[in-house]
Image (cartoon, rainbow, N blue to C red):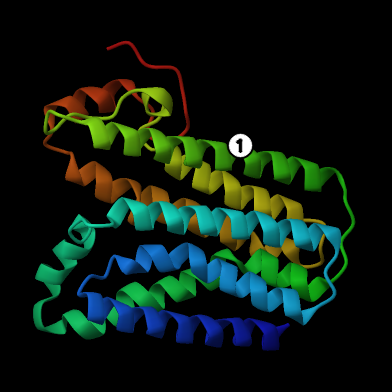
Amino acid sequence: MLTIFINCFIIITIYATLWFVVALIKKRNDVADIAWGLGYIIICGYLFTTNKSSPVLLLLYSLVTLWGLRLSVHIYLRNKNKNEDFRYLAWRKEWGKTFYWRSYGQVFLLQGVLLIIIISPLINAAISGVQHWNTLTLIGTVCWLIGFYFQTLADWQLSVFIKHKKIPGTIMQSGLWKYSRHPNYFGEIMMWWGIFIISLPLSNSIFFIISPLTITLFLVFVSGVPLLENKYANNPAFKKYKKRTSKLIPMPVKKV
């Protein structure tokens, strides 16, 4: 088990380093967001070669590959011909002379470590071997499909809104965004809980609950929700939107 985890870490370290070089050439660190989803596909490809794949393992690889490919393509199209994402621009100014080594460590290598933690249920599944279809396979797959629906639709709705937005400061408040301020993050979290549920029948799987917990805590308290909420904190329209709309889990609109 340890050997495969170490190999995955080595692969991702090399992968992250290559993307850091790309970032230096492009002079924009937000290429890390494109690399995020593709990194999971690289690991799935490696795991596929390590063991005889069962139908459930193939399902896991397929779900993660579909998620990673869609996300990376979406982010590439979103960032194309635009300035560097506001988060990375802020760090570029904040880090000053330490920008380069902090970018490598705190953006690319850290992302690699998080990637290994989050994909750990798949690594455990590849090591454990054959897994047969069961009730948890169905439950986890349904959970993943709900999450994929929310993330894909929310991203599409937001991209259409931004494309046609005419008044600066206007906030997206329709579609799935009417019921959640971050429906795309809700979808992301649902998908990784689904992956964990599918892997639950395998030995030692309960220890890899660290995967969905990590992505949940990271998006809700660290890099996802807080950064975007702070960005719009002084926006009057967002203040009203915040009072009546659930932060993450889609809920009926509150009367205020």
Residue at x 42%, y 80% (from the top left corner):
16
The reply to whether residue 248 is visible in this rendering is no
Q: Nearer the viewer, residue 73 or 132?
A: 73
Which percent across, then down, holds residue 225?
Answer: 33, 46
Would you identify the image quadrant in which residue 126 lies? bottom right
Q: Provide residue 232's location: percent of width, then percent of height.
A: 18, 39
Compared with residue 157, is residue 117 higher up or lower down, i.e. above or below? below
Give the amino acid at mark 1: Ile
- On the image, which quarter does residue 7 sit in? bottom right
Image position of 126 (left or right of 227): right
Graded by Cα atoms within 10 Å as few (under 14), some (14 to 19) or many (20 or more), the crowding at tag 1 reads: some
**Residue drawn at (41%, 24%) of the image:** 175
Up/down of 234 relative to 131, above or below: above
Q: Position of residue 237 (x, y in %)?
A: 17, 25
In the picture as drawn, the residue positioned furthest to the front comes out as: 81
Answer with left or right where residue 121 lies relative to residue 51.
left
Q: Is residue 219 left or right of residue 5?
A: left
Q: Is residue 252 left or right of residue 117?
A: left
Q: Nearer the viewer, residue 226 or 160?
A: 160
Q: How many marks?
A: 1
Query: Which quadrant is home to the N terminus?
Result: bottom right
Q: Residue at x 88, y 67 (%)?
A: 130
Quadrant of the image containing the C terminus: top left
Residue furthest toward the top? 255
**Position above or below: 77 against 142:** below
Examine the rendering and report whether any part of residue 46 can be seen: yes
Which type of secondary structure does the marked residue at label 1 adopt?
A: helix
What x and y, as percent, mark residue 247? 37, 34
Q: Which residue is mark 1?
A: 146
